[in-house]
Image (tube, rainbow, N blue to C red):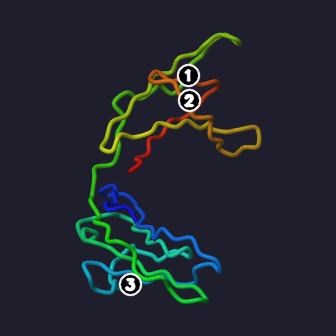
Amino acid sequence: MPSVIYVPIGIHGYIRCPVEAEPPVTLVKWNKDGRPLRIEKYSGWNLLEDGSIRIEEATEDALGTYTCVPYNALGTMGQSPPARLVLKDPPYFTVLPGWEYRQEAGRELLIPCAAAGDPFPIIAWRKVLSETGEPSVLPRLERPDPLVVAGGGVPWATQVA
C-alpha cells in the first residue's frame, strides 16, 4: 500500500488493498488508526468485492491511517504497511474548451484545454457518442497543451498519486 492515499474532497474516492493472491482473495479486513474499521458506521462507505473501500463523498471522517489484512483459502500473509489518507481538492479546469468546433476535413483542429491540481491531473478525452452510441475514450496523446483531438470530444481530468 502506498504510504499516502490521496482522496478528493467532496466526491467519491477509493482505498485499495494492494494484493495479488493465488488462490484469490476471499476477504479483506481493514483497520483505521490501529482499530478494526466498522464500515457500516460510515454513511456512503462500501466494501467492494475486491476488498477496496469506496467512499461516496470524502469528508474529514475519512482522515486517518489505514492498514488491510487480505485472506484467501490458505490464510493470510499479514497486515499491509500503514497508509495515511489525505484529502485533496479535486482537479479543476483552468481552460475549458467550447462546446463545438468546426474545421475542414483533413485539416488540424486545435482544441485548448488545461487543468490544475495537486497531484497534477491527467487530461483525457472521449467522444460524446461513438458509432455504437456509447462513449468511447480517445487515445492519450504525448503532446503537451494544447491537445490535438480528431472529432468532437469532452475532456475530463483525473488525479493520479
Please tell me whether residue 152 is drawn above or below residue 26 in the rendered image: above
- At mark 1, the secondary structure is strand
- At mark 2, the secondary structure is loop
Please tell me whether residue 135 is drawn above or below residue 66 in the rendered image: above
Q: Quadrant of residue 56?
A: bottom left
Residue 41 position, x and y percent, is: 33, 84
Residue position for label 2:
141
Residue located farthest toward the front when viewing the structure as drawn: 77
Circle 2 residues within 10 Å: few <14, some 14–19, many ≥20: few
Residue position for label 3:
40
Residue 147 position, x and y percent, is: 51, 24
Quarter of the rendering occupied by the N terminus: bottom left
Residue position for label 1:
148
Tags 1 and 2 touching, CB below 8 Å: yes
Please tell me whether residue 145 is drawn above or below residue 28 in the rendered image: above
Q: Measuring 31% from the left and 41% from the top, which residue is drawn there?
A: 117
Task: Decide if residue 149 is on the left or right side of residue 96.
Answer: right
User: How far apart are the alpha carbons under marks 3 and 1?
Assistant: 46 Å
Q: Quadrant of residue 114?
A: top left
Q: Amino acid at mark 3?
A: Glu
- Nearest the viewer among 52 and 91 is 52
Task: Decide if residue 119 is on the left or right side of residue 77.
Answer: left
Q: Measuring 37% from the left and 34% from the top, which residue is drawn there?
A: 115
Q: Amino acid at mark 2?
A: Leu
- At mark 3, the secondary structure is helix
Mark closer to the observer (1, 2): 2
**Which numbered disc flags the more N-terminal residue, 1 or 2?**
2
Circle 3 residues within 10 Å: few <14, some 14–19, many ≥20: few
Mark closer to the observer (2, 3): 2
User: How far apart are the alpha carbons under marks 1 and 2?
Assistant: 8 Å
